[in-house]
Amino acid sequence: MTTLCLTLDYELFGSGKGNVYKHIIEPTNHLLAICAKYEMKLTIFFEVVEYWKIKETFENGETMGYDKNPAEAMAKQIRIAHQLGHDVQLHIHPQWVDAQYKNGEWILNMKYWRLPEVPENATEDISIGLGELIRKGKEELESILHPVNPNYTCNVLRAGGYNIDPSEQLLKVLKENGFVADSSVYYGGKVDSGLSQYDYTHVKKEIPYWFVNDSLLAASNTKTDFLELPVFAKNITRIRKYDLVRVRSALKNKANSIEKLKNSSAKKSKWESIKHLMAKEAVTWDFCLFSKSKMNEFFESAIKISKASEVSFHPFVLVGHPKDFYFTHAIDYLSEKANSNRIKFCTISEVIARIKKTNSQK
């Protein structure tokens, strides 16, 4: 039986665009209903800084076009999700620090797109340092969820946009605040754009997790108290990523899709754009954007890898976003496999507990 960990990045679009109810609350409710029907479990990575700014802005009298407090709806939803057995952990996009809502749109602090670049202490460019940001994010989630579970602990991070390199200072801060794992890496990933920068091409998809000491990207020679749990990905020709489900989802989010297309095609000639589409790309295993056939392709790869694995417990981390969830093709496929007893679903906290138990018995 293959163990899958479905993780959900709970957020608006990276530019600040989007509607909390349309792009977060409603699709997450749909996902939660499906999970209840098929006994699936989610790990919700809650974007806490975005939540702070929405909450603060609404409470200061700027409704942002909402009839009801969207921050209250977000907090209520993750409480319900946690009561239903789903995990909730920390997600941070630092561009939301010092964000301002002006003339009907969010103005984000684009100097700090990458979490590892947040300075240790506040400066004139950012009002909160890295240590305080992590600590307050952890405290916020625990204050939201302790009323329904006094034993809840926030101790896993996913950095916004998979940006965790360089990770030495970030890892130090995480350890100081009681974190036990990160899930910001994905197999084979490489981006060098004006905003995101990382290189995970050395990470092999056959390795389900690793213990770390000083860097999240370097496996420790000994068992430590901190884990990196990478998102599973496969290298495929980039044009194959854009199947019908992804294209139709992009059309649903037309304004944001056009903006992303402009950014990715900037300064590229037609020939360069064609070469770009025909090149290989590490594509993350996405349960909100995949077609049934692509989900089958990734699942069959996972089975082969787990059969040849050198570890007795080999989990696979998937990723999704509520803002992308318009079609149920991939979830339907997973439900079929679950009904035939080919899949077991675990939260990220359950995966960590299982890994530690497995390794303590050796």
Image (cartoon, rainbow, N blue to C red):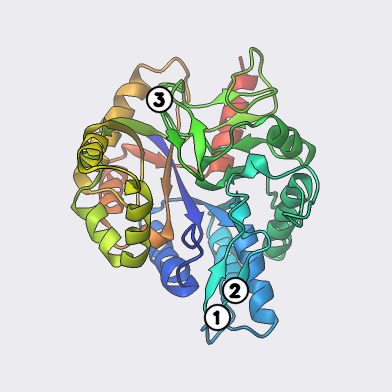
Can residue 327 be spotted in the picture? no
Foreground residue, 324 or 128? 128
Q: Is residue 167 above or below residue 139?
A: above
Quick one: quadrant of the N terminus?
Answer: top left
Q: Residues within 10 Å of mark 2 (few under 14, many from 20)?
A: some
For badge 3, the amino acid type reads: Lys
Pointer 3: what residue? 205
How many angstroms separate mark 2 from mark 1 (CA)?
A: 8 Å
Q: Residues within 10 Å of mark 1 (few under 14, many from 20)?
A: some
Image x and y of residue 183, in percent: 55, 38
Foreground residue, 300 or 10? 10
Q: Is residue 121 above or below residue 136?
A: above
Can residue 41 be spotted in the picture? yes
Image x and y of residue 345, in percent: 43, 43
Question: Residue 234 vs residue 21: left or right?
Answer: left
Provide the secondary structure element on which disc 1 rests. loop
- Residue 293, by quadrant, is top left
Q: Do the residues under discs 1 and 3 have CB atoms within 8 angstroms?
A: no
Q: Is residue 123 above or below residue 235?
A: below
Q: Do the residues under discs 2 and 1 have CB atoms within 8 angstroms?
A: yes
Pointer 1: what residue? 64
For badge 2, the amino acid type reads: Tyr
Circle 2 or circle 1, nearest the eye: 2
How many angstroms separate mark 2 from mark 3 (CA)?
A: 41 Å
For badge 1, the amino acid type reads: Met
Quick one: quadrant of the C terminus?
Answer: top right
Pointer 2: what residue? 101
